[in-house]
Amino acid sequence: MNTRYAKLAPATTRLVTGVYDRLDYGALGAIYCYEGGDEFWRAKRGPCVRLGSRIAVLLKKKLKRNGRSLYVGAGVAELPPMIMEAVELDRTVEPHNLRKAEVIALNRAGRALPLTFHAVDAAKAKGCFDHLWMVSVLNDPERFPNLSPLTYGQGNPLTLDTMKFNKERRTVRALVACCMGKLTRPGLVTTTTEEVIWIAEWCHQHGVAYRVGKRYYQTALVGDPICFIHIGEED
């Protein structure tokens, strides 16, 4: 599918636009930044719609109808692909986000959508999924302040707290193991280039074939490029 010409269905675009129109950006500003929330969302709302819709078009080709997707740490930026999956592919979409205030804002704005955000750990999701979305989760500086800098090559060996780092690494590995254990094969993982190593490690440990896509795609908020990993494909 050539994404230069492919588009989302008009109904999907209307739903996406409607949700972004209804979002409480005052509440979201306090979640995403310490100050200047209004200015932040004036600058980021457009890229969220535009870049999110581009990823949605890509997923439209890669995913099957009537499947199930687990979105870990999903928020404002993930709205376009999630809406596309639910509306155009009749897929079950299960987004999880540990920030309760954001979940409340998203569910209020998206009350007409065929999906509901859950303010619980994605590890508690039930059943199997053929698509796992894990973008800017395993390198989140708020949740993993000791591990995240090393992901970006910014760690200081003189000040690194190895005990805290090891604890965070165990948490990341446990989350990856739990979520990857729910992924059917063949399956698809959407993640960032910085988080590929965690998925690859799990695949190597379990003898599962994987293939990382060669193309990367820009994201709206964090800036980490997205890629797709095909899991368990037959040769």
Image (cartoon, helix red, strand yellow):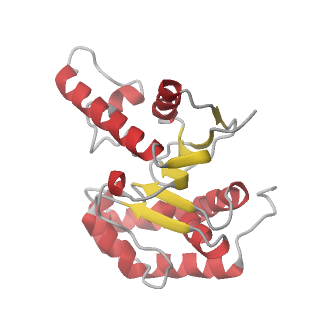
Position of residue 76 relative to residue 199, above or below, is below
Q: Would you say residue 138 is visible in this rendering?
A: no
Residue at x-position 36% and y-position 34%: 173
Q: Would you say residue 39 is visible in this rendering?
A: yes
Residue 203, position as x, y percentages in the image? 52, 30
For residue 75, side relative to residue 157 (left or right): right
Residue at x-position 50% and y-position 42%: 224
For the N terminus, give its image quadrant. bottom right
For residue 37, side relative to residue 216 (left or right): left
Quarter assignment of residue 122: bottom left
Residue 61, position as x, y percentages in the image? 73, 58
* Residue that sits furthest to the top in the current view: 158
Residue at x-position 66% and y-position 73%: 88
Position of residue 225 relative to residue 86, above or below, is above
Viewer-nearest residue: 223 or 83? 83
For the C terminus, give its image quadrant. top right
Residue 163, position as x, y percentages in the image? 18, 23
* Residue that sits furthest to the bottom in the current view: 112
Residue 152, position as x, y percentages in the image? 42, 29
